[in-house]
Image: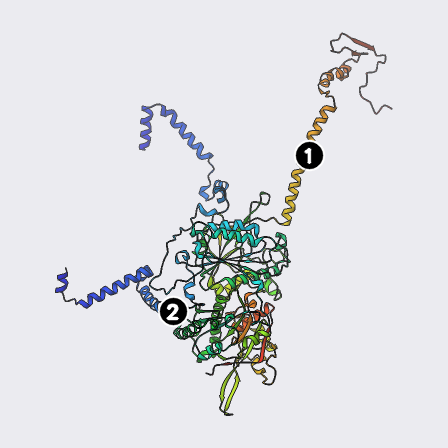
Amino acid sequence: MLSKFRNSKVKLPWIIGSITIISIWIILVWIHGISMLTPWGLAYGIISSLTHTRRHYVPNFNHIEGVEFYDLNNYIGHANGWQRKDRILFCVPLRDAAEHLPRFFKHLNEMTYPHNLVDLSFLVSDSSDDTMNTLLTNLQQAQSQENKLMRFGNIEIFEKDFGQIIGQSFSDRHGFAAQGPRRKLMARARNWLGSVAIKPYHSWVYWRDVDVETIPTTIMEDLMHHDKDVIVPNVWRPLPDWLGNIQPYDLNSWVESDAGLALADTLDDDAVIVEGYPEYATWRPHLAYMRDPNGDPEVEMHLDGIGGVSILSKAKVFRSGSHFPAFSFEKHAETEAFGKLSRRMGYDVIGLPHYVIWHIYEPSTEDLKHMAWMAEEEKRKVEEGKIKEFYKRVWELGFEDMRDDWEQERDSILLNIDYTILENNKHGKIVVDWSDDGDDSDIVEAEVTDQQPIQADFDPNKN
Amino acid sequence: MISLALIKYRVKKHPIWAILFPFFVILSILFIISKRDYNILGIDPASIVNKKWAHEIEKTWYFSFTNKYKMPKYVYKEQKDWLFSDHVEDIIPENHIAHYDLNKLHSTSNAAVNKEHVLILTPMQTFHKQFWENILQMSYPRELIELGFIVPRSPSGDEALKKLEAAVKKIQSSKKNERFAKVTILRQESPSFDKLEEKERHALEVQKKRRSVMALARNELLFSTLGPYISWVLWLDADIVETPVNVIQDMTAHDKPVLAANVYQRFYNKDEKKDDIRPYDFNNWQESDIGRELASKMSDDEIIVEGYAEIATYRPLMAHFYEPNNPITEEMILDGVGGGCTLVKAEVHRDGAMFPNFPFYHLIETEGFAKMAKRLNYEVIGLPNYLVYHIEE
C-alpha cells in the first residue's frame, strides 16, 4: 500500500498536512466534545480556543512575603466543582445556637462534598448561652478526626455583637412588628460575615442556618450541578400530629407578583415587605407551596426573593457586590432583597420546588400553650380515673345491693294489682290472694255491696 | 367457528365440559357486569383511593423522590483542564481554627496611634510611576497599610501588572520595616474595564456601561481583600499622583464614615503663562432640587451623571468650593462621591455599602455607593479645601 502511495502523484507535504489537520481536529473533539464535528462548531471551537489560550501574564511572587496574586477567572465555579477542586465558603451566622450545634456538626460530617474543599466561617453574635465554647469543642472534634479526609479546610470564627432588638423565642422572632428591624439587623450580621470571610480563591459561597433537622448528605452536589448563580432548595418542617404532620416553612422564596409590586409602590422608602403575614397580602407564588412530593427534584423555578436557610451561590455573585441589603431595597431586606438585588445585577436566581430540606420544628407560643393544655388534660384524665375507681369502691362498701331481692319480690308485690282480674270480677266480689306464691290457698273474698261496676279509673266528669 | 367445532368435540369427548363451560360463561358475564372499571373514561377512582404519598410508601417524608426519580450519581474523580488552564496551585491554610473578635475592631480619629489597619484599593488600568512614589512617600506606618490592586483582563492590564510586579517585588523584599503589611493583586473576572476608547468616554450610554463595569471591578477588589483586621478603606485611583504626605492621618482624623478629598489637576496655564491647578473630579456633589426633580421623572433604568449638557442638574459640585485661604479641615455634606481619593470606614462596606453596577436611585458606581451609604444611615462628607492631584494627561 505504501508503495502505491509512493508511486502515485500525491506529494508528501499533502499527507503530512492532512494528518496534522485531522489530529488537531481529533484533539478539538476530544476536548470540546461532539459539537466540534460540525463545521460551525469547529469554527467556534477554533476561535474560542485561540482567544482562551491567549494566556495573560501571570506574575511570580514566590518567596516574597505578604504578596498574593489571584486570577479571579480561575474561581468562577463549575457544575462539577467537587472534581475541579472548587473551594466552598460555608457561612453560618450563629446566635444563641448552642443546642443546635451538635445536630449541625453531624450533618456537616456526613456531607459528601470533599471536606478539605470546604472552608467554614462562623459569626457568633449577641449570644447569651454557651455558643462559643460548644462551637469550639465541636470544631476541635471535627478537625482532630482520625481520617484526614474528614477534616475541613480553613476555619474562621468571627465575633461581633450588633445589639439585640428583640428576643429569640419563636414568637418574638416571627411576630409581624418585629420583622423589619429584625431583618435589617440580620442582614448586617450576614454582610459582616460574608465580606470578611470571602477570599479570592473561593468559587462558591454556601449560606446555611444551623437549625436544620434533616438534609441530604449530597446537598452541595445536588445544588451545584445545576450550575446556577444563586440556588435554593425548598424548605419544609415536620409538625406534631395534632398540627397535621408537615408544613411549608420558608415563605421567603417567592416569585414577584403584580399585587406585590403595587403594594411596594404604596409603601414609603424604608418599609420592608415580609412574606407570610396577613398585613401584607402580595399574592405571590411561594416556592414552598409548589412542592409535589412525587415530583422531579431536578425541576427549576425562577425566583425573585429567596429564604436564607440554605443558599448556594457562586462566589462571583458576592464578589461583584451582591449582598443582603440592611436597608430597604425595593421594599425588601436581607435574603429576600438579596434575591432581588442579584436579579437586578443580572444573575439567575433559582429555586427547586420538589427538592426539600427539613427545618426543625420549634413550637410557637400558641403551640406551647396548646401543648401545656394537652399535658394538663392528660394529668386531669389520670386524676379523674383515680377518683372514679375510688367512688366505685365506696359504692360497693356503703350500700347493700338489693337488686337480686327485688327481682324475686317484684312478682309477689305486683300480684294483686292485676287490672284484668278486677275487670272480670264485675259481679260483686273482690278477690285478694294473700298467699305468698299465688297458689289460691289463702283467698279472701269481699262482698261488694254497691251494684255499680267498679270504676278503675278516676272519672273527672263525676263531681 | 373453529373454536365452536373444537368446543363441540371437547364436549363430546369429555362430558364434564358441558357443565364447566356454561359455568365459566356465566361467571365471566357476571364478572364483566359487576366489575366497576372506569378506565375507558380515563378516570381511575381506585388508583386515587389507593394513591400513596411518597412518604407513606417509604415510611419517611423527608426525601420523597427517591422512589420514582433518581438524583444523579456523582463521580469524585478529579478533572483537570490541562490544556487551557493557567491555574496555579494556591497555598491555602488547612486544619487550623482562627478566631477573630470584630468587636475590638475600631476606626477612630487617632488611627495611627491606635494601630488601625488601612486598606488602600486601586483599580489599575495603567501603572504610573508617580502614583507608586506617592504611595511610598505616605507617612502612615507601612506595617498598618495593606494594598489591593485589580488589573483588567487585557494587554494593557498585562503591562500594568508587569510594572506593578516589579515595584511590589522591590519594596516587599527590602527591609522588614519598609514592607507593606500585605499586597493583594487580582486579575479581574468581570468584563474588562479598560476596553473603551478615550474619545468614546463621554457618550452617555458608553459612560453608563463604563461605570457599570468599573463598579464590578471595584466590588471584586473590595470583597476579595477586606480582611478581619481592616479598619479603614482608602479608595485611591491609579491616576492620583500627588497627595499630602499625611493624607491618611489627616483624613482619618475627621472620623467620618465616608470622606472624599477634592481632586484637582496641575497644568500649565498658557494664558497666564504659569503653573496652575484646575478642578478635575465632578462626582463629589450635593443633591439639588432640580436633580431630585429630574430623577423623579426618569424611568428606572436611566442614570444621572455630572458634566452633560442634556442633564443639567445644577448640583453644587465640591470641585468648585475650593477656597485656598480657608482651613483644609473644612467639611461639607455630600450626596455623591467620586473614587479619586475617598476614605471609608470599613464598617460601611461591611454593612453592605458597595458600588452598584446598575442604576440605584438613578446613580451608579461611586455615586451609587454614596447613596447606599446614606440608605444605611451613614453620613457622606467632603473636604473642599483638601486637594489631591490627578495626573496631567
**Which residue is located at x 22 percent, y 67 percent?**
A17
Is residue B125 visible in the rendered image? The answer is yes
Mark sitting on residue A228: none
In the rendered image, residue A258, in percent from the top left (x then y), is placed at 56, 61
- Give the structural element (helix, strand or loop) at label 2: loop
* Residue hosting label 1: A384
Badge nearest the viewer, 2 or 1:
2
- Residue B184 lies, with reference to residue B239, above or below; the image says above
Task: Please tell me how crowded label 1 is: few (under 14), some (14-19), or many (20+) other residues with Cα within 10 Å.
Answer: few
The answer to whether marks 2 and 1 mark residues whose Cβ atoms lie closer than 8 Å is no
Q: Which mark is residue A58?
A: 2
Mark 1 belongs to which subunit? Answer: A
Furthest residue to the bottom? B272
User: Is B231 or B240 nearer to us in this picture?
Assistant: B231
Q: What's the residue type where badge 1 is placed?
A: Glu
Q: How many marks?
A: 2
Q: Position of residue A168 (x, y in %)?
A: 62, 54
